[in-house]
């Protein structure tokens, strides 16, 4: 793993590299070590300095490493230069995240979205490659065989991008219809958002009692939206929707490709924003979630900050984190999604928030109250 330490960064490079190690582990790739370089800005030609690249080459030789994974976004030129200098296959962080998404995508929709992101990512990288091919292949006044092959491949990819975009357009239309139907029936939707591994699926699993919802200790378990009907303590029914999590430096190609999924979030009446209280970097993680919500146009939706995994931290740490979050203007509810603690209070807050904006919600109860597993 190769990390850069840049002066204007908020996140420490160690934290980022540790996260990269987890990301790689979830692809089944073991990391044998990391090399870090402190720079004022990235080198335009190969990201790190040439001397450092030579260190990386020797490091790979000594450790038998086959991949060099850079914790940054690489331009096609930087990638191909680094491959030449290190003799290893070079990946960058967006590519790693996309690879995980590719592996986890189950539904046709998620698969299409991932393929779109990967194809869009591949096209500019292909251009770098194409230049080399045409240089070796082309003579004066001729079109080299390399160039034609490259052109053909590029055209194929561009055709595929158009095809997928069209299919996803249909998905978005269908989703819109479903949402309109829900809205007519007056059922509010509440979206669970937050960092990957913060416990969104666990919360939905405990609330709905549906054990078929996948919740695991790994990054990006969930890529598809799943919706469950939940009855609030006062008797009103709402829909909770669980979806893909966020991460630091989420590749823009993925955000764009997952538009259909993220639009579900944008249409929600209320957000439950989960934060893992046991994350030592919880404050920095909070900022990442807020920035991502702003990126996808959801910063104005009313929200409750759900401070999760309270069973895994000391009450003092939890309290000081909650104080910090309240000072940021957040409405904080502490829970343990895993053990079902604090959920009744959380649902009451949900009820209060909805009632203050939604007439429908103050209608008399017509469902049985929900019971929670208490520890
Ligand atoms: N100790 C503790 N662990 C929890 C709690 N909630 C969730 N976890 C654990 O955290 C891990 C991740 O939980 P998930 O529910 O899969 O997290 P997620 O936010 O859905 O993650 P992605 O789908 O990957 O974005 C699992 O191992 C859960 O058991 C909690 O309240 N306490
Ligand atoms: Mg999940």
Image: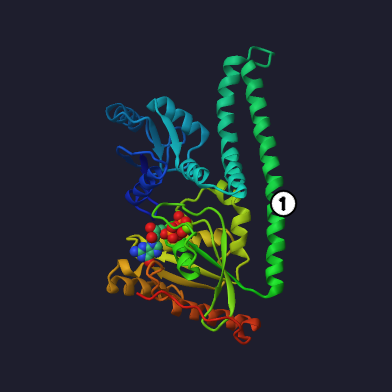
Classed neighbour count for the residue bearing mark 1: other residues with Cα under 10 Å, few (<14), some (14–19), many (≥20):
few
Quadrant where the C terminus sits is bottom left
Residue 124 sits in quarter: top right
Residue 37 sits in quarter: top left
Q: Relative to 7, say whether 55 is above or below.
A: above
User: Which one is nearer the viewer's eye here, 71 or 335?
Assistant: 335
Q: Do we see residue 288 in this rendering? A: no
Residue 226 sits in quarter: bottom right
x and y percentages locating residue 24 in the rendered image:
39, 42
x and y percentages locating residue 168 in the rendered image:
67, 49
x and y percentages locating residue 340 in the rendered image:
40, 72
Residue carrying label 1:
170
x and y percentages locating residue 308 in the rendered image:
39, 68
Disc 1 within 8 angstroms of ligand 1 (CB): no
Q: Residue placed at 40% from the left, 52% from the top?
A: 218
Splitting the image into four quadrants, where does ligand 1 fall?
bottom left
Q: In this view, does 192 lie to the left or right of 28?
A: right
Q: Residue placed at 31% from the left, 66% from the top?
A: 312
Q: In this view, does 80 lie to the left or right of 33?
A: right
Q: Do we see residue 319 in this rendering? A: yes
User: Which one is nearer the viewer's eye here, 70 or 257?
Assistant: 257
């Amino acid at each position: 793993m190769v990390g850069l330490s840049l002066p204007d960064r908020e996140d420490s490079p160690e934290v980022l590299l540790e996260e990269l190690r987890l990301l790689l582990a979830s692809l089944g790739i073991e990391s044998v070590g990391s090399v870090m370089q402190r720079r004022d800005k990235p080198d335009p030609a190969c990201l790190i300095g040439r001397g450092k690249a030579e260190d990386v080459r020797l490091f790979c030789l000594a450790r038998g490493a086959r991949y060099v994974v850079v914790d940054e976004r690489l331009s096609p030129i930087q990638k191909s230069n680094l491959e030449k200098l290190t003799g290893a296959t070079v990946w960058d962080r967006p590519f790693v995240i996309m690879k995980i998404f590719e592996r986890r995508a189950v539904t046709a929709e998620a698969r299409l979205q991932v393929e779109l992101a990967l194809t869009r990512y591949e096209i500019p990288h292909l251009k770098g490659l194409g230049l080399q091919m045409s240089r070796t292949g082309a003579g004066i006044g001729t079109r080299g065989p390399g160039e034609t092959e490259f052109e053909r491949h590029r055209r194929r990819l561009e055709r595929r991008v158009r095809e997928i975009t069209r299919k996803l357009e249909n998905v978005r239309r269908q989703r819109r219809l479903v949402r309109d139907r829900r809205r007519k029936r007056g059922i509010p939707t509440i979206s669970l958002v937050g960092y990957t591994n913060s416990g969104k699926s666990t919360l939905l699993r405990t609330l709905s009692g549906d054990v078929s919802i996948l919740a695991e200790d790994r990054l990006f378990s969930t890529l598809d939206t799943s919706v469950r009907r939940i009855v609030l303590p006062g008797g009103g029914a709402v829909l909770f929707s669980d979806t893909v999590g966020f991460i630091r430096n989420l590749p823009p190609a993925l955000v764009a490709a997952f538009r259909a999924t993220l639009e579900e979030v944008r249409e929600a009446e209320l957000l439950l924003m989960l934060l893992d209280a046991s994350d030592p970097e919880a404050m920095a993680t909070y900022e990442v979630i807020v920035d991502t919500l702003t990126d996808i146009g959801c910063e104005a939706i009313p929200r409750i900050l759900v401070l999760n995994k309270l069973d895994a931290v000391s009450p003092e740490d939890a309290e000081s984190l909650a104080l910090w979050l309240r000072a940021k203007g957040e409405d904080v509810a502490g829970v343990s999604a895993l053990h079902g603690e604090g959920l009744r209070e959380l649902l009451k807050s949900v009820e209060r928030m909805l009632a203050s904006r939604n007439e429908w919600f103050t209608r008399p109860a017509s469902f049985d109250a929900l019971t929670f597993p208490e520890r």
